[in-house]
Image (cartoon, grey):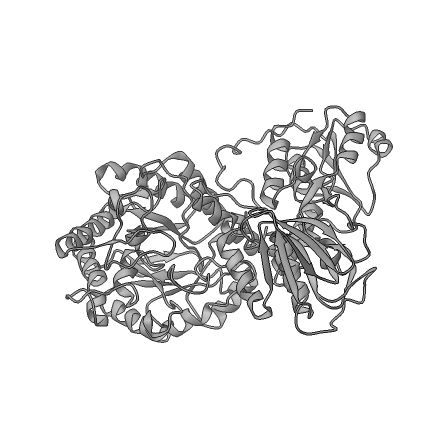
C-alpha cells in the first residue's frame, strides 16, 4: 500500500526514506528573540517519531532587527545559535528523518515592532499601513552575506540541507516578483535582474558550503495577478535558471499577500491536490526533485499525485499538525485512523495573534512537553462520558489510553456531536472525514459506545463509575423577541440538517460561522427545495447572526435560490473567524449578491420580515423576508448539566456543556481535563 509514497528519494547526496515532506510552517514555539528551546525540539521530535521522511523547518532568521520574521523562531545568525540547532537536528536524526533548515528574511512583511520594514521596493503590505524602505545596494550585499552565514551555521549544526524562502512576498520573493520589485537598477526590471539577489545568495552558499550540501528554493509559482506578477510560465523560467545555478530541489507553493485568492494557506473548502498542476508544470522544465505543496490531507491523494508524476515529494504540512503519526499510520495500512486536518486555519490564526501554534483536532500540538508524561493508572476503572462530540470523544480517548474503561453515551446514532451539523455546509467534507476517523479510533480502542442512547442518572449510577465527564454540548440560542415562535422562523441547524424546506428568499440573523455557510444553500435558482422538512423556507431569507454558522448557512440557502440578508449585532461580518476563511466564503457568495447588515440588533419578527435597530444610530429598519433563520450561537444545556451534577457532584463539565466555543476549545478542554483526572 502506498508504494510510491514510501519509496526512498534522493536530493543531491541525501537519501530520504520516503517521499513525504513536512513543509515549513511557523509555529512560534522557539525561544523569544530567536533560537532553539525544548518546546520546538519536542514539536519536531513528535513528527519525526511519526515517520515523516523530510522535515523542512519553520522560517529561520539569519539576522535580527527587520530580518526577524516571528517573535519566537529558530535562528542561524552566529555561533551562539549553533549548539541549539545541533540539538534539534540530532533529535530528528534519531528517527531516520532528514532535516533541512529554511532560511528567511521577511522583507516588507516585518511586523514585530514599529520599525520600518525593508524590501526591494516601497510597495506597502496590504493592511499594514507601513511602506517599506527600499534597500540600498550595500544593504542588499549585507543581507546576502547573512543568508550565506546562516547556511554555514546550519551545515555546521548537522542539518542535511537548507531551503531559501523565495515565496509568499518575503524578501527574496520581493525581488523576484515584478509586482513587488519596481527598481530600475541591476536588481530590478528584467527577469535576469530580478533574479540577481537570489542567484548571488546561491553562488555565495555554494562557495561557502560546497557543491554537495543540498540547497533548495521555495517559490510562489502563481501570484494570481496576471502579467503584473509572476505567472506560472515565468516561474518555470526561474526554476530552469535555478537548476542551472546549482540548486538541488524546488519547493512549489503559491501567492503573495496581494494575491486575490487565499491560496498560500487555503481554507478547508479548497480541494486536496488543487495546486498540483503548478509543480507538474515546473517539473517538466527541470530534472531536480520537486516538492508539491497542494493542500494534501490524506495519503490516497498523496500517492495519486506522485503516481501522476506531478512531483517527487509531497508536502504535508498541516496534516502533521493534526496527526504527527500521519506517515506511520499510512504505512501500517491504517489511513482511516489518521486524525484529519479540516482546514479551519486555527493554527494560522493562533500565530497571527502572537500565540503558539494549536490545532482543532490535536490538542497536543504546541503542547508536546506539557502532555509528555501521561499517567497510566486507570486500572480498568469505569468512567462515564456523556456526549460524543469533540470534547467527549477526546476525553474518552485519553481516559482509555490511561487505562480507564470509558463508557460513552450519545443520543445520536453517529459519533461526532455538532460536527455532524458543521459538515453540512458546502465544501465541508473534510469534517465528515474527521468524524469517520474519530469512529475508527474509538472502535480500535474498544471504547464502549452507547450510541442512540440517552444517558440518565439511573443508567450512569448502575455502572458505578469512578468519574463522570459531562459533554452534552449546547442548544441553539433563541432570543426572547416578539414573533420568535412564528412558523416562518427556523434555526440554522434546521436548514443545514435538511429539516427545513427551502422556498423563496431569506433573512439570516447571526453571522457566527454557521450563518454564512447556510446562506449559500439559498439564492437565484428558484424552487430548489429540501423536501425533508418540517418547516418551509419561503421567499426572501433573513439570517440573524454572521459568525461561521450564519455564513455557512447563508451559502447553502443562497445556492438553493433564495435572496438573502445577513444581519448581526457585531460591527463586522464573520467576527471571530479567520480572515482567509471569511474571504473565501464571501468570494463564493458574491455572485448571489447577499445583503449585509452588521451592527444591527433584532427587535421584532413578523410574518413579512424583521425589524432591526442600528446600534450606532438607534434608528429602526424593516427588512422584508418570508423566512427568518437564526444563527445566534449556542448556549450550554444547563438543565442537563445540573441534573447530572446533582447526582455526581464531582463530575467534570467539558466542551460546549461548560462554555460554548469552537472545536479547538472543546478538544483542548476534553484532553486537558482527562489528562489530569484522578479517580
* Direction from residue 427 to residue 11 in the image, left or right: left
Q: Quadrant of residue 400?
A: top right
Q: Quadrant of residue 490?
A: bottom right
Measuring from the top left, give residue 467's x and y in whole percent: 73, 28
Q: Residue at x 37, y 73 (%)?
A: 226
Instruction: Quadrant for the N terminus, please.
Output: bottom right
Residue at 60% across, 69% down: 592
Q: How many marks?
A: 0
Q: Can you say which quadrant of the picture contains the C terminus? A: top right
In this view, the residue farthest toward the left is 138
* Left or right relative to 568: residue 529: right
Depicted 590 relative to depicted 370: above or below: below
* Rendered position, 375 above or below 301: above
Inspect this view and state whether residue 109 appears: yes
Does residue 286 appear in this view? Answer: no
Q: Is residue 487 above or below residue 671?
A: below
Amino acid at each position: 500500500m502506498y508504494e510510491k509514497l514510501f519509496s526512498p528519494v534522493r536530493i543531491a547526496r541525501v537519501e530520504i526514506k520516503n517521499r513525504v515532506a513536512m513543509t515549513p510552517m511557523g509555529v512560534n514555539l522557539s525561544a523569544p528573540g530567536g533560537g532553539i528551546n525544548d518546546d520546538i525540539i519536542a514539536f519536531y521530535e513528535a513528527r519525526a517519531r511519526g515517520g515523516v521522511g523530510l522535515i523542512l523547518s519553520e522560517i529561520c532568521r539569519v539576522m535580527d532587527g527587520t530580518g526577524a520574521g516571528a517573535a519566537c523562531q529558530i535562528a542561524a545568525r552566529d555561533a551562539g545559535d549553533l549548539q541549539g540547532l545541533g540539538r534539534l537536528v540530532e533529535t530528528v536524526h534519531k528517527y531516520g528523518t532528514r532535516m533541512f533548515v529554511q532560511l528567511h528574511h521577511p522583507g516588507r512583511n516585518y511586523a514585530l515592532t514599529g520599525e520600518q520594514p525593508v524590501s526591494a521596493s516601497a510597495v506597502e503590505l496590504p493592511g499594514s499601513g507601513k511602506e517599506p524602505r527600499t534597500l540600498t545596494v550595500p544593504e542588499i550585499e549585507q543581507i546576502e552575506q547573512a543568508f550565506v552565514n546562516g547556511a554555514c551555521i546550519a551545515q555546521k549544526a548537522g542539518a542535511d540541507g537548507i531551503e531559501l524562502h523565495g515565496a509568499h512576498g518575503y524578501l527574496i520573493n520581493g525581488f523576484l516578483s515584478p509586482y513587488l520589485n519596481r527598481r530600475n537598477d541591476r536588481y530590478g526590471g528584467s527577469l535576469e535582474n530580478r533574479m540577481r539577489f537570489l542567484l548571488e545568495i546561491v553562488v555565495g552558499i555554494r562557495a561557502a558550503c560546497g557543491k554537495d550540501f543540498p540547497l533548495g528554493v521555495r517559490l510562489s509559482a502563481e501570484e494570481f495577478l496576471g502579467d503584473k506578477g509572476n505567472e506560472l510560465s515565468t516561474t518555470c523560467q526561474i526554476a530552469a535558471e535555478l537548476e542551472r545555478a546549482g540548486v538541488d530541489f524546488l519547493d512549489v507553493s503559491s501567492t503573495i499577500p496581494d494575491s486575490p485568492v487565499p491560496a498560500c494557506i487555503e481554507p478547508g473548502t479548497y480541494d486536496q491536490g488543487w495546486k498540483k498542476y503548478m509543480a507538474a508544470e515546473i517539473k517538466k522544465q527541470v530534472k531536480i526533485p520537486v516538492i508539491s505543496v497542494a493542500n494534501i490531507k490524506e495519503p490516497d491523494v498523496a500517492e495519486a499525485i506522485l503516481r501522476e508524476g506531478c512531483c517527487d515529494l509531497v508536502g504535508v504540512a498541516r496534516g502533521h499538525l493534526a496527526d504527527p503519526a500521519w506517515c506511520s499510520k499510512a504505512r501500517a495500512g491504517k489511513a482511516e485512523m489518521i486524525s484529519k486536518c479540516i482546514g479551519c486555519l486555527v493554527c494560522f490564526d493562533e500565530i497571527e495573534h502572537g500565540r503558539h501554534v494549536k490545532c482543532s483536532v490535536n490538542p497536543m500540538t504546541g503542547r508536546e512537553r506539557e502532555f509528555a508524561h501521561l499517567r497510566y493508572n486507570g486500572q480498568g476503572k469505569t468512567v462515564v462520558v456523556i456526549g460524543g462530540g469533540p470534547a467527549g470523544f477526546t476525553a474518552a480517548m485519553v481516559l482509555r489510553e490511561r487505562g480507564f474503561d470509558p463508557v460513552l453515551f450519545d443520543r445520536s446514532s453517529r459519533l461526532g456531536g455538532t460536527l455532524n451539523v458543521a459538515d453540512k455546509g458546502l465544501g465541508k467534507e473534510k469534517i465528515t472525514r474527521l468524524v469517520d476517523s474519530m469512529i475508527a479510533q474509538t472502535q480500535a480502542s474498544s471504547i464502549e459506545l452507547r450510541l442512540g442512547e440517552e444517558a440518565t442518572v439511573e443508567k450512569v449510577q448502575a455502572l458505578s463509575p469512578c468519574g463522570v465527564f459531562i459533554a452534552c454540548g449546547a442548544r441553539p440560542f433563541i432570543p426572547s423577541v416578539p414573533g420568535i415562535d412564528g412558523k416562518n422562523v427556523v434555526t440554522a441547524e434546521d436548514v443545514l440538517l435538511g429539516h427545513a424546506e427551502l422556498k423563496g428568499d431569506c433573512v439570516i440573523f447571526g453571522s457566527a460561522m454557521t450563518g454564512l455557510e447556510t446562506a449559500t444553500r439559498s439564492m437565484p435558482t428558484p424552487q430548489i427545495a429540501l423536501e425533508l422538512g418540517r418547516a418551509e423556507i419561503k421567499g426572501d431569507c433573513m439570517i440573524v447572526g454572521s459568525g461561521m454558522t450564519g455564513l455557512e448557512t447563508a451559502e447553502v440557502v443562497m445556492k438553493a435560490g433564495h435572496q438573502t440578508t445577513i444581519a448581526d449585532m457585531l460591527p463586522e461580518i464573520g467576527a471571530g473567524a479567520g480572515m482567509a476563511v471569511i474571504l473565501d466564503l464571501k468570494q463564493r457568495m458574491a455572485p448571489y449578491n447577499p445583503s449585509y447588515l452588521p451592527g444591527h440588533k433584532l427587535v421584532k419578527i413578523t410574518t413579512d420580515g424583521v425589524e432591526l435597530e442600528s446600534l450606532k444610530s438607534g434608528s429602526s429598519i424593516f427588512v422584508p423576508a418570508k423566512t427568518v433563520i437564526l444563527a445566534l450561537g449556542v448556549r450550554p444545556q444547563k438543565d442537563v448539566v445540573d441534573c447530572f451534577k446533582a447526582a455526581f457532584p464531582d463530575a467534570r463539565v467539558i466542551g460546549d456543556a461548560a462554555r460554548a466555543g469552537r472545536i479547538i476549545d472543546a478538544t483542548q478542554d476534553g484532553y486537558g481535563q482527562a489528562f489530569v483526572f484522578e479517580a
